[in-house]
Amino acid sequence: MGTQPSSETLRASLSAASLTLHGAAYGAARETSLTGLAALRHFDDVFREAPAVENREIEDAFKLRYQVYCLDRGFENAAACPEGMERDRYDDQALHCLLRDRASARPLGTVRLVRPAAKPIWFADLPLTDYATQESLEHIVQLPAGSTAEVSRFAIARAAREILQAPGAVTARQIDRAAGQGTLGERLLPYMSLGLIRGLVRLSMQHGITHWCLAAEPSLLRRLRGFGLHFRTAGPLVEHRGLRQICYADLAELLSRAHAERPEFWDIITVGGFLLSGDLARAAA
């Protein structure tokens, strides 16, 4: 199964990698540092992400998944979820995260990290093995068995943009131009993705996860690249609820490149670097 790094070792590795910048990249990071901190403040005006640990929180995640995966997108059979909660056999071995808006605390998005449990072929217990090609699995098997998890059930409710524009909703003082044009709700949608990524980073730091793998829609990967988050592809596109790309990332490398390319988004994802420091462990104690 491999050796899982300690939380302190992981934090030191991620922090060092993310803060090692050279030449033009270092200068660019300095120039955009104020923009990055402003984006972080604007994000935290509107959103709140946190691990879903209590039963009611996990049920909120399942209910949101039912709305997105069963009703909005038709990926799962609504009739198979009589309680209005979408769940599967991987949830018991998964870490869950919820994104809420601060005004009403209504769930806007959810994501999970599935940790494989099967032995001796550790990756056989990941959801993507149900449809990944042999070529893709040859890449996945090279990842560290003790600290790899699959990003899964990445979901943002269609109703989120309406929730954020409801009377009385807290809105950001200024929205970064990179978020795009359109209504306030539409411009905030990319920030919701960043919130879920922040949740994944938080869970990874807390549980010693160093590598991610996932099966992503090409449109999601393009959006993530816009945030400076670049995943390595593993094999060809596969058919699973439409075309999906199996991919993976070393978390230290992923965040290091994001820091160099888009430090303003890195600030949101890592809470200004807080999630990569020992302060997270002390705060959780």
Image (tube, rainbow, N blue to C red):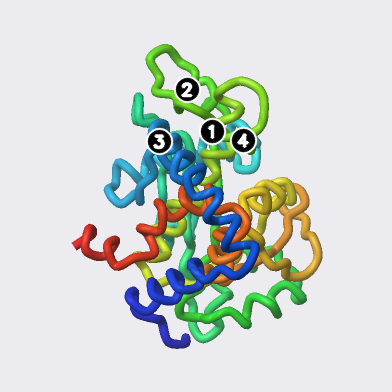
Residue 265's disc number: none
Q: How crowded is mark 3: few (under 14 residues within 10 Å), some or many (20 or more)?
A: many
Q: Identify the residue under disc 2.
A: 163
The mark nearer the N terminus, 4 or 3, is 3
Q: Identify the residue under disc 4.
A: 179
- Determine whether the residue tagged by mark 1 lies in a helix, strand or loop: loop
Q: Distance between the residues labelled 3 and 1?
A: 11 Å
Q: Residue 149 in the image: state x and y as whole percent.
A: 51, 68
Answer whether labels 1 and 4 touch (C-beta < 8 Å): no
Q: How far apart are marks 1 and 4 (CA)?
A: 18 Å
Find residue 94 and report its image quarter.
bottom left
Q: What residue type is labelled 3?
A: Arg
- Determine whether the residue tagged by mark 2 lies in a helix, strand or loop: helix
Q: Could you tell me which residue is drawn at 34 percent across and 74 percent down?
A: 7
Q: Nearer the viewer, mark 1 or mark 4?
A: 4
Q: Is residue 199 left or right of residue 142?
A: left
Can residue 190 be seen? Answer: yes
Q: Could you tell me which residue is drawn at 72 percent across and 46 percent down?
A: 219
Q: What residue type is labelled 4?
A: Ala
Find residue 139 and report its image quarter.
bottom right
- Determine whether the residue tagged by mark 4 lies in a helix, strand or loop: helix
The mark nearer the N terminus, 3 or 2, is 3
Q: Identify the residue under disc 1.
A: 157
**Which quadrant does the C terminus fall into?**
bottom left
Q: Which amino acid does label 1 sit on?
A: Ala
The mark nearer the N terminus, 3 or 1, is 3
